[in-house]
Image (tube, rainbow, N blue to C red):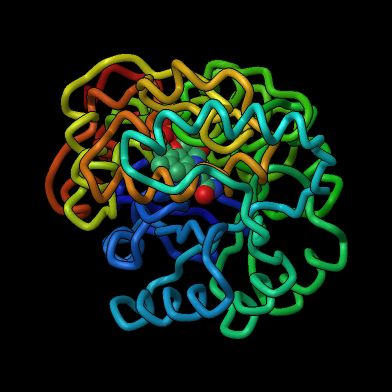
Amino acid sequence: MTTVRHTPGSQEHDAGALGALGLTVPVVLAPMAGGVGTPELVAAVSGAGGLGSLGAAYLSPAQITGAMKAIRRLTIRPFAVNLFAPQPVPEVEAAQIEAACAELQPFHAALQLPPPAVPAHLQEDFEAQLEAVLAEPPAVFSFAFGRLEAQHIRALHAAGVLVVGTATSVQEARMLEADGVDAVVAQGGAAGGHRGGWEHDDLADTLELTRGVAGAVSLPVLAAGGLMTREHVRDALAAGASLAQCGTAFLLADEAGTSPPYRAALQQGGDTVLTRAFSGRTARGLRNAFSDRVAHPLPYPYQNALTRPLRSAGAQAGQADVLSLWAGEGFALARQGPATQVLEALTPDPSGTPGSPAGR
Ligand SMILES: Cc1cc2nc3c(=O)[nH]c(=O)nc-3n(C[C@H](O)[C@H](O)[C@H](O)COP(=O)(O)O)c2cc1C
């Protein structure tokens, strides 16, 4: 078995197949679709010895190709690309669409947008996205929202790509292991952004879930959710994780695509909530007027497509009240500055033994 040696003389974390990546820092930049996870951010984290992940779920195949090229112009280090596992698109009734549009109308009117309507193009085609990824395969492919078909896992493995699934419970982790993934993200309830599981979401404490998943599967585990400091990362490794996957910690990094009103809202403080208001799928973000008032969202991907024009216009107009301000419970600890500094602040003290007070 290979290991990740994140600092000479430090504890070793058995990273299984991920050991081949040669990471020197046991931190994965979480994939963050929707503009936050820029190629510059991904490359900065990979270039500094962590694993950067490109959140590509909302990108067209051509945009994926462009973003991967941009990363490769900036670093020769390995990186990950992340997509959402394909979902069956549910049926929606005209009355549901009417109710969802009626809820959005006042927000549209306030920004002088045309009345809300569900567009014909709901989401990107997964097969075409995956084809773009496989055209110049990254070292790692991660996915959320479900399971991949065996043929997709086979195609990724044939291209030499390590496959990482996302679980929100021990049951889901076991299913992903049975599917043949190479590693599993254990996403605790504190995590920012969408819940990455599909049927058994325990909204568990990240360390407890990490312990449970590490005990239940014989795959490397990436702990995710609320890991904002080097002590948090150290504790996650001590709980059995091979790597820590951090998203919210990077939201204020210079290279992040976080819009100015989003940055301001994070710095202003407040509470996070789990809401379906923006996309139709449960996600954690800062509470705002939109998450408070929208009570009848359409299922994913309809609501996501329906709210896109409003979110774009809100970002342009500096209106945080209509933006999906994805953030984990630890957002108050997010640091500003270059991503390399943020990564450094997440790197466990080399003298620290997992679980010991050293390095605190
Ligand atoms: C802004 C944002 C966008 C996210 N987008 C994705 C995504 O596209 N794919 C994915 O698998 N996870 C996504 N996540 C979830 C992360 O993978 C990860 O579980 C989470 O960031 C970990 O918790 P933390 O935010 O407290 O660090 C996103 C999280 C945030 C904060």
Q: Quadrant of residue 249?
A: top left
Task: Compare residues 114 and 73 and report the one nearer the observer.
Answer: 114
Q: How many marks?
A: 0
Instruction: Provide residue 50's location: percent of width, then percent of height.
Output: 36, 56
Is residue 13 visible in the rendered structure shown here?
no
Q: Residue at x 39, y 19 (%)?
A: 272
Q: In the rendered image of this protein, does residue 157 appear above or below residue 84?
A: below
Q: Residue at x 45, y 58 (%)?
A: 53
Is residue 357 visible in the rendered structure shown here?
yes
Q: Quadrant of the C terminus?
A: top left
Q: Residue at x 55, y 36 (%)?
A: 194
Q: Residue at x 86, y 68 (%)?
A: 151
Relative to 265, 66 lies left or right: right
Instruction: Provide residue 275's location: percent of width, then percent of height.
Output: 53, 23
Q: Quadrant of residue 288?
A: top left
Relative to 311, 340 lies left or right: left
Q: Quadrant of residue 295?
A: top right
Task: Compare residues 8 and 79 and report the one nearer the observer.
Answer: 79
Q: Quadrant of the N terminus?
A: bottom right
> Can you name the residue that lies furthest to the left here?
337
Q: In the rendered image of this protein, does residue 242 appear above or below residue 322?
A: below
Task: Compare residues 176 and 317 and report the one nearer the observer.
Answer: 317
Instruction: Provide residue 112's location: percent of width, then percent of height.
Output: 33, 43
Instruction: Provide residue 4's location: percent of width, then percent of height.
Output: 46, 53
